[in-house]
């Protein structure tokens, strides 16, 4: 196996630590995943021989928690049931790809996964929404046409990259297309999420959440007037 360590820049101090191994068998990935169990670190992503191990930074975890909170605010104000499963391990049906998103959500549909010990591809429904935060690693492999998320046909991804670069990616005709608004929350624009994330960085997370909730409540009231 060849190990590739990234990044090699000063951003390592504030970003995630990431190691990529090549030539890894699916049996090795599954054994490592089983041995790690419910431990939060490192996070694993496997795709057809390549294994990425990511040790999230405090900033990474703060952003993930913030985005999770934004999803829950949206669900509450737009009256949608929400089931969150953290960084639950997902697998492709052929077993050649698997990984742990930063956050997994089921919206508006009931699921018995909270009683299950693992996600069963081909049996359990795919999540409705996945959150990915990339500070030093990349989720590009997961969202490409042959990637894990596309194969599972996950309808929507909120993907954050350093520099307040949030994308809303919607699965359409076999691939992910960037959109300006959420599919599950049509009144929520990507720009509104970016502004909340900016407050996360320039003020603090609680200020960002309070501002976001206030904006959404105003939008809901205005919509009722129409």
Image (cartoon, helix red, strand yellow):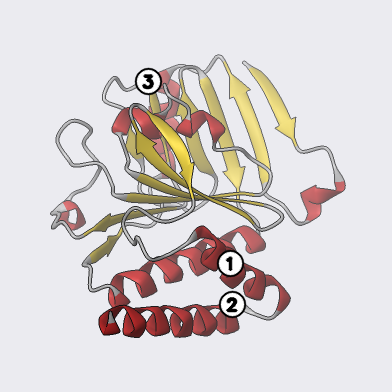
Q: In this view, does 174 lie to the left or right of 50?
A: left
Which tag, 3 or 2, sits closer to the chain's start? 3
Number of disc labels: 3
Cβ–Cβ under 8 Å for marks 2 and 1: yes
Front-most of residues 97 and 76: 76
The secondary structure type at the circle numbered 1 is helix
Q: Residues within 10 Å of mark 3 (few under 14, many from 20)?
A: some
Front-most of residues 74 and 178: 178
Q: Residues within 10 Å of mark 1 (few under 14, many from 20)?
A: some
The secondary structure type at the circle numbered 2 is helix
| Residue under pointer 1 | 62
Please tell me whether residue 198 is drawn above or below residue 46 in the rendered image. below
| Residue under pointer 2 | 205
| Residue under pointer 3 | 96
Which tag, 2 or 1, sits closer to the chain's start? 1
Occupied quadrant, residue 170: top left
Please tell me whether residue 67 is drawn above or below residue 123 in the rendered image. below
Q: Is residue 89 left or right of residue 189?
A: left
Q: How crowded is mark 2: few (under 14 residues within 10 Å), some or many (20 or more)?
A: many
Residue sitting at 47 percent across and 81 percent down?
215
Q: Which residue lies furthest to the right in this view?
A: 10
Q: Is residue 8 left or right of residue 193?
A: right
Quadrant placement of the N terminus: top right
Residue 191 at x, y percent in the picture: 56, 62
Residue 167 at x, y percent in the picture: 54, 49
């Amino acid at each position: 196996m060849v190990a590739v360590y990234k990044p090699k820049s000063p951003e390592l101090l504030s970003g995630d630590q990431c190691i990529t191994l090549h030539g890894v068998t699916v049996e090795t990935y599954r054994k490592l995943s089983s041995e790690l169990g419910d431990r939060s670190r490192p996070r694993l992503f496997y795709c057809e021989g390549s294994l990425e191990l990511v040790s999230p930074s405090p900033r990474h975890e703060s952003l993930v928690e913030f985005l999770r909170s934004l999803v829950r605010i949206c669900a509450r104000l737009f009256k949608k049931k929400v089931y969150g499963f953290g960084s639950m391990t997902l697998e492709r049906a052929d077993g050649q790809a698997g990984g742990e998103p930063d956050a997994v959500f089921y919206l508006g549909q009931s699921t018995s996964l909270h009683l299950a010990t693992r996600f069963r591809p081909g049996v359990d429904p795919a999540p409705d929404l996945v959150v990915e935060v990339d500070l030093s690693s990349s989720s590009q492999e997961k969202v490409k046409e042959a990637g894990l998320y596309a194969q599972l046909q996950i309808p929507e991804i909120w993907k954050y990259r350093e520099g307040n670069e949030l994308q809303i990616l919607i699965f359409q005709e076999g691939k992910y297309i960037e959109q300006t608004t959420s599919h599950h929350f049509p009144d929520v624009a990507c720009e509104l999420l970016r502004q909340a994330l900016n407050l996360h960085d320039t003020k603090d997370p609680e200020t960002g959440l309070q501002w976001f909730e206030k904006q959404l409540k105003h939008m809901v009231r205005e919509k009722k007037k129409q």
